[in-house]
Structure formats: structure tokens, C-alpha cells
Image (cartoon, helix red, strand yellow):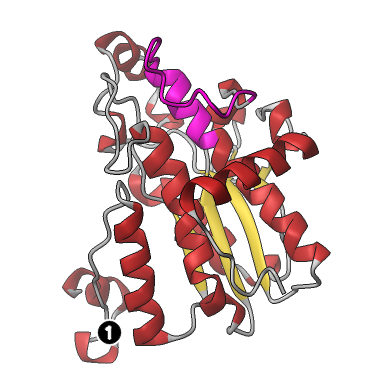
């Protein structure tokens, strides 16, 4: 709280931060968090689904038995958005921002019954699949919002770029060695890496914009810029049949109710 106050020039008495417990590896915890939030606040202006894991070297399962990338990065955010959707609907203008990744491009979700990799676990594939899931969820939710005439809630996805954080701490020495060879120009600080999702979350120029995938353009030699991405994106992300299949799978696995979207 004190860091926020210093950054904004406001005293802590003028700004209130509430912290609640949320374990994204437990769908029960997700439901509990959403229940507490809805009871305490009622409305929600902005939801940024950002937290996640990357490149876990060995197969690990969530409390609910899902491979950890899939359970934490995708299923928990899907359920959280569903549980908080009534609070989003009660706001004049609400935004959902799903943090995906260029890694979606090597994801493959053609077989939704084989996402625990019990016989052939690959950290890169597992991470890419979860990021493709985030992107597919974004596009399908946007379609359903528009189909039902819900205009006060928008949803977009972002790729923040290559950011120097501890998210990649499980990468192999070979991969980290390659990244270290990149000039600092291409590797963003956390502050610069947050730029795209913050702008998509609050920029007035994006009011009413929905169903887009915005990506940092540093790797395209355009630092400090982001744009709608149409190249580094899996064809599966635009496959309407697969989008519906993933949605149906997600409802079945999480028991998401989507109150406020079904009416």
C-alpha cells in the first residue's frame, strides 16, 4: 500500500487496498474468493486475469487433478471470470483482460481429453496450450457477449512481450542462455512489460473495443508500442467449432454457471 501511495502521490488514507486469499490451483478457492468479493463489493469494473505459472519441469497436478499450467493458467481464470460475471454486468462499463502469450502459437487443443500429459509431459507444450486456452476463451466469450447483446462488458487478450521476471525461473539453462544473448532492447522491465495490459485495461481509446488480441511490438522493432496481433497466433484460436468445444469442456470441468450471460 505504501508503494502505491508513493507512486500516485496520495496518502494511504485516500486509497484503500483490500487483499483476499486466492489459490488458483484450487477451484474451490476460486469460488470462495469470488463469493467474498461479490458480498463485499457487489460490482466490478475491471478483471485482469494475469497470474500464472510457466515451464514447470516435472508434471504437477492442481488440487483438482489438472496439469498445473492448464489448471492455474486457464481453468481457474475461466471459472473466476464466470463467478465474477454478475459483478461485471452490474457495472456501467466493465473490462476483462486475459493475459495470453506468443506461446499460444505452438499450442494445440485438438484433443481436450488429453491435457494431463501422463505419458508424454512437455513443459513448453503445456504452457503453450494454457496460453492458447486464454486466447480461445477471449474470442468465444466475446462472441457470446455480442450474441446476447451485452455491450457493457468487453473482453480482450494481450501478449505483454518478453519480460524479465521470475516467471521463467524453471526454464532450462539452454533456453535462459539464449535469452541472455538478446540485447536489453528486446527484454522488457516489469514496468514496461505491464504497459500493454494496463493500457488495454484503462485506455479511453479502447472503450467498447472487444474480442481483440493486442501484442507488444518490441520484437518487431517497435518498442513502446502494441498492436492487434494477426501473425503470431494459432489457427485454432479462430476455429469456431474448437472455440465452442473448449467452452463446453470448460463448463463441464469447472461447473461454471455464467449467471448473467445465459439470460
Coordinates of residue 213 in the picture (x, y in percent): 66, 46
* Location of residue 34 in the rendering, given as x and y in whole percent from the top left corner: 38, 70
Question: Which of the pair 208/198 is nearer the observer?
Answer: 208
Query: Can residue 188 be spotted in the picture?
Result: no
- Quadrant in which the N terminus appears: bottom left
- Residue numbers of the magenta segment: 110-131
- Relative to 170, does residue 92 appear above or below in the rendering? below
Q: Residue 92 placed where, x, y %?
A: 63, 85
152 left or right of 13? right
Q: Could you classify mark 1 by the number of other residues whose Cα lies within 10 Å: few (under 14), some (14-19), or many (20 or more)? A: few
Image quarter in which the C terminus is found? bottom right
Up-down: is 96 above or below 117? below
**In the rendered image, which residue does mark 1 sit on?**
16
At 57% from the left edge and 24% from the top edge, which residue is drawn?
Answer: 107
Residue 61 lies left or right of residue 101; in this view the side is left
Secondary structure beneath label 1 = loop
**Residue 234 visible, this orientation:** yes
Amino acid at each position: 500500500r505504501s508503494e502505491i501511495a508513493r507512486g500516485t502521490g496520495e496518502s494511504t488514507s485516500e486509497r484503500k487496498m483490500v487483499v483476499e486469499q486466492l489459490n488458483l490451483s484450487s477451484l474451490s478457492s476460486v469460488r470462495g474468493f469470488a463469493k467474498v468479493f461479490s458480498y463485499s463489493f457487489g460490482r466490478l469494473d475491471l478483471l485482469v486475469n494475469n497470474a500464472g505459472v510457466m515451464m514447470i519441469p516435472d508434471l504437477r497436478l492442481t488440487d483438482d487433478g489438472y496439469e498445473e499450467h492448464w489448471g492455474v493458467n486457464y481453468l481457474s481464470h475461466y471459472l473466476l471470470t464466470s463467478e465474477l460475471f454478475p459483478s461485471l454486468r452490474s457495472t456501467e462499463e466493465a473490462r476483462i483482460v486475459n493475459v495470453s502469450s506468443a506461446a499460444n502459437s505452438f499450442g494445440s487443443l485438438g484433443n481436450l481429453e488429453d491435457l494431463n500429459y501422463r505419458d508424454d509431459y512437455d513443459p513448453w507444450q503445456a504452457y503453450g496450450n494454457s496460453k492458447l486456452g486464454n486466447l480461445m476463451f477471449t474470442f468465444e466469450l466475446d462472441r457470446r457477449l455480442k450474441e446476447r447483446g451485452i455491450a457493457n462488458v468487453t473482453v480482450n487478450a494481450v501478449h505483454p512481450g518478453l519480460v524479465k521476471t521470475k516467471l521463467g525461473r524453471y526454464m532450462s539453462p539452454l533456453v535462459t542462455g539464449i535469452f541472455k544473448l538478446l540485447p536489453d532492447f528486446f527484454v522488457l522491465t516489469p514496468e514496461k512489460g505491464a504497459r500493454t495490459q494496463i493500457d488495454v485495461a484503462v485506455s479511453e481509446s479502447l472503450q467498447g473495443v472487444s474480442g481483440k488480441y493486442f501484442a507488444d511490438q518490441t520484437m518487431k522493432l517497435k518498442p513502446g508500442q502494441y498492436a492487434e496481433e494477426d501473425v503470431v497466433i494459432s489457427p485454432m484460436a479462430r476455429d469456431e467449432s474448437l472455440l465452442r468445444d473448449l467452452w463446453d469442456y470448460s463448463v463441464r470441468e469447472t461447473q461454471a454457471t455464467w449467471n448473467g450471460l445465459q439470460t
